[in-house]
Image (spheres, rainbow, N blue to C red):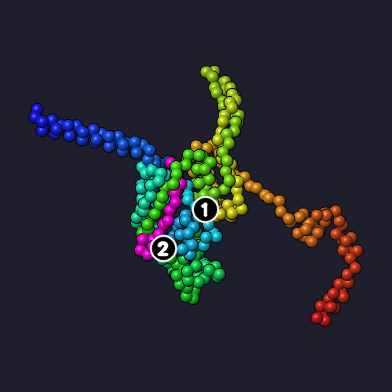
Amino acid sequence: MSDQEQADAADEAEGTETDAEGLESRADTDADGLEDGDFVRVAYTIRTADDGRVIDTTDEETAEDAEIDVDEYDFEPRIIALGAGHVFSSVEEAFLGASVGDEGTVDVPAEDAFGAYDPDEVETVKADKIPEEDRYPGAQIQIDNRQGHLETIIGGRARVDFNHPLAGEDLEYEYEILARIDDREEQAAGMLGMYLQEAPEVRIETVTEEEETVTEDDDGEETVETEAVEKDVLYVTATQAMQMNQQWMFQKQQIAQDLMDRLDLDRVVIEEVIEGGGMGGLGGMMGGMGGGAGDVDIEEALEDVDVDADEIVDEIDEE
């Protein structure tokens, strides 16, 4: 073998070794990449593609610049569960296989965001279906369990657009993956934060309960056996805002089931906390009568009151 042939063979062997190392390196990276079911903390800002209008963000300064009311929401990175539908599908695809520290921008087409604009979703309805206080252009209204906004109202007819306000809008999702979340309590608080726009206090406890099982022998006789079983229970402290949240009020069963499925829980317990206040006894709300009225003969009490009804009527007539 000539010197040139030996050199070519060495280069080929080195290239093969380099390729193998590259494949091994990429395999290690993929193994460490995010997967379906992982929880991650993400900072993001969502803008409309055509004019850059901010529609959602976790950054308070960005919200202030966009003239979004910063007093109404908590602006901080969110915890999302991959595969739970917490982000647009195109964004989730970008997250799968990614690593902590990755950042970028995903173009989200309208069809993947809030859908294409449908002219058939603009309808004329009777004005009396709309509360009087909402009969003005731009009002957000609900008719027959459908959410829409009022375009115009003339006489007894109203033009209502039932499309989502962002229907037909392409979006830009700018993100940074900050951390992978493995703690189940933090995961639970994060999921509730996605649903409720706030993260209530939570804790997970393992409790031991006795369960009865009925077995039947070959002769058909039943035997009841008691077994100690451990169960993981999520306790959620319900805040006043949470109790007034419409999504929670109407979907608490589905939200609780989602938590149990994704966090491998056996039960979700909502704890209502009533703090002591300065309202005093209930009697104070009724001018002092509420507390002891049951011990008083009302007829006797009225007889003891020195009031002349005829005098009161005469005074009213004079006025």
Q: Quadrant of residue 15?
A: top left
Q: Which mark is residue 53?
A: 2
Most common secondary structure along the magenta stretch: strand
Report the label total: 2
| Spot occupied by residue 209 in the image (x, y as percentages of width and height) | 60, 31
Q: Is residue 299 left or right of residue 63?
A: right
Mark 2 residue element: loop
Instruction: Identify which amino acid the numbered label 2 is placed on.
Output: Arg
Compared with residue 49, is residue 212 higher up or lower down, i.e. above or below? above
- The quarter of the rendered structure image containing the C terminus is bottom right
Depth check: 297 or 82 in front? 82
For mark 2, does the 10 Å Cα neighbourhood hold few (<14), some (14 to 19), or many (20 or more) residues? few
Residue at 50%, 46% (x, y): give it: 191
- The quarter of the rendered structure image containing the N terminus is top left
Looking at the image, is mark 1 or mark 2 nearer the viewer?
A: 2
Magenta extent? 38-53
Residue at 45%, 44% (x, y): give it: 179
Q: Which mark is residue 197?
A: 1
Instruction: Identify which amino acid the numbered label 1 is placed on.
Output: Gln
Q: Is residue 279 left or right of residue 165?
A: right
Q: Is residue 266 left or right of residue 160?
A: right
Asked whether residue 179 is drawn in magenta, I would say no
